[in-house]
Amino acid sequence: MAGLTLEHLYKRYDNSGKKKKTVNDYAVKDLNLVCEQGEFVAFLGPSGCGKTTTLRMIAGLEEITQGNIYIGDRLVNELHPKDRHIGLAFEDYAMYPPLNVYGNVAFNLRAKGVDKNEIDRRVREIAPLMQIDDLLDKMPVKLSGGQKQRVNIARAIIREPELLLMDEPLSHLDGKARQAMRVEIKRLINKIKCTTIYVTHDQLEAMSLADKIAIINFGVLQQFGTPTEVYDDPVNEFVASFIGEPPMNILETTIIKADGKFYFTFKDSNLHIAVPKRYYSVVSDGFRCKMGVRPMDVLVGGPDSDGTPEEIATFENLGDERRIGIHVGDVLLMLITEDEKRYKRGDIIKLEVREEKTHLFDIETGDRIREK
Amino acid sequence: MARITLENIKKAFGKVQALDGISLDVRDNEFFVLFGPAGAGKTTILNCIAGITMPEEGTVSFDGKIMNLIDPAHRNVAMVFENYALFPQMTVYENMASALRSKLYREDEATIKERIDKAAKMMKMEKLLERLPSQLSNGQKQRVAMGRALVRTPNVFLMDEPLAHLDAKLRNSMRTELKEMQANLGSTCIYVTHDFMEAMALGDRIAIINKGKIVQIGSGDEIYYMPCNEFTAELMGDPQINIIPAEFEKNGSGYNVVIEVNGEKLKKELPEDKAVFAKIAADGIGKADLGIRPQHIRYSFEPAEGYFKTTVYSYESIGNKSVITAECGKYQLRMIAPNGLNVAIDSDIYLKPELDRSILFDSDSKKYIIRYDEEAIRAFATKEVK
């Protein structure tokens, strides 16, 4: 059974003030998505891409312009939010300040008229799970940001929702607390096995938490897949450059043919990289496109390397790793190395590229060009 | 450009001692980073140098000349702030020209144009000169703010978290650009940040600041590999260094370090260092804290010689690699693993900490005692650039 199904979902805000109607008037456009029962799915995209709008439509806080939403097998388009069996945890904690933690966690059950003993049983069951057992008597003002977010999530899951919706729940926390909380959320979801939609603009958070990632841009779903799929096999230039830090190097290239082999060449640069054989059926001499390669797949060659000699433009020693920047035309090609060697600006290295890891993108549309 | 010296600077705001005896010597043409958590006093130091804040005690001098009584305008420092502080009604060109046209400089228009063109080229913003700040992205605004500082020939550039407002991606690319620009420029620059990657990437030297005091000053390598205490060690590196309890055990004339992983013991002889041995003996230190970075723990999903059985607490992908956290009984260990592994939470994992890459700290004072590979590190680590 699917946990959540979105069918041809559209959202259009009334922009009657604007003169020109374009496709971009749609905050969400023809979104189709099936999340399996118990799956943890992240909605990822830059701000304004429509991910929160989609979440709010699922929650029933926003009207649907067109399309269907199913939670489990139930069509919920017309249902009131309270009847959709969802749990919500948003960025701001929105706790009831006069109630202590226990009161806050129990509030929704009390409102529903659940039996007192049953409420107590459920609060006591969830408290250790969220590590808030020691906080139950405290007032919200006494809690740290991380603790508040724990209470907030406890409040969402105590209703035993069919679907848990989270909107940037970690964005208020500082680096350390965020890292710790990420681990806790992951463990929690793994334990309660509740279908979860998690909205974030932080690719790292999406990569580390989610079973699957839905990458959205301009209201349109770009790709839906596991973290490994979107990282290794992006469908277009947007996904390729949005996932990963530092981002994938993407360079305009003209492919040339020499001695029966194809090479990527670049404007104002001596760099040339062999085109993987699998692309031979789709490229030709003089073919223009973009080439993408991740910084981890660009290497410093050894003394016997036949890589192209290049001058180092930037060298950053970050402790855990080192990053080297090379000018290829007017683009800075980045590479990451964990090698201990310290370089400096102006040093010459032999640049090697793991050819098999290169991707081709259409120069106009940014779509991935795949081997046939 | 100038050499900036601070001697025993003290400053209190009410009951809070914001700066508690700060002494620094920033060399001519050095890129010097002030790094520490929020509220450490980094910005207050910058303000004392600029003359915006008056210290209660201590001296600020430029090239040996005491500046305490000189007002900010005449110190000839260029500041770049987190929030750009551009004049909204002026174009980029006018923003950059504003300081040069002021009473203090009164440069002629030809000189102004020449300098702006040069700075604009360096900052890759030749095409933006006629735009208003409202027509710029955040990254471009920060570039203009820096360009405006650049057109003057100040004694020192003071930069207060100039990249903090930018999103992660832009911040990293701007950081790389700034590094390139600084190399081209050759100027004294004092740079405040709370991002360790910025500190490492940019600083010729880094000063770690905490609670109004200097904790450590050194090159990035020195601070990363030989942190003077646990506080500094935890600041540098992501994911954070693991710090776990350890014990010293007498072994002939030297010592073993012993750690416990899930009830089993792992020993490693300390490298010969008479001074360290003497200190351990004299202080009667039995316990220590052992710091080991996540990349120095090996793992296996099958039992293996020298590996300890633990369980997976979490497995997280962090882009090009992932972090496994293992439950080891009294503590947890974070380690680096490749992406795309099929790791189930609470499943078994076998670990081998490479103790010869670890750092030992005094478990009471939290101060650095020794690291096993100190000699090897000293051989390749960048001491101080320039």
Image (cartoon, rainbow, N blue to C red):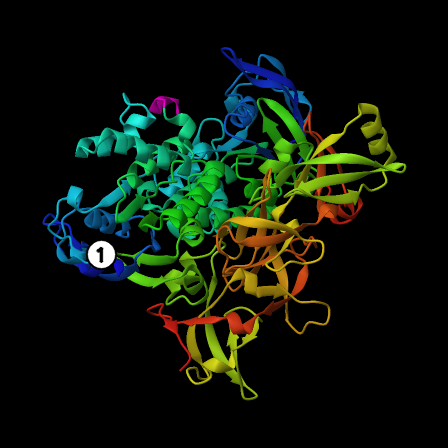
How many marks can you see? 1
Dot 1 falls on a residue whose secondary structure is loop
Q: Which residues are magenta?
A: A137-143
Does the stretch in magenta take in A275? Answer: no
Residue A347 place in picture, x, y as percent: 68, 58
A339 relative to B253 in the view: left or right: left
Q: Residue at left 72%, top 36%?
A: B360
Q: Residue at left 31%, top 44%?
A: A167
For the N terminus of chain B, the quadrant is top right
For the C terminus of chain B, the quadrant is top right
Query: B337 or A17: which is nearer to us?
Result: B337
Q: Residue at left 43%, top 38%?
A: B97
Query: B178 or A239: which is nearer to us?
Result: A239
As drawn, A38 above or below B190: below
Identify the amino acid type marked 1.
Gly
**Residue most toward the front?**
A117
The residue pinned by badge 1 equals A72
As drawn, A339 above or below B20: below
Q: Is residue B27 visible?
A: no
Residue B135 place in picture, x, y as percent: 31, 45
Q: Chain of mark 1?
A: A
As drawn, A255 above or below B156: below
Query: B293 or B99: which is nearer to us?
Result: B293
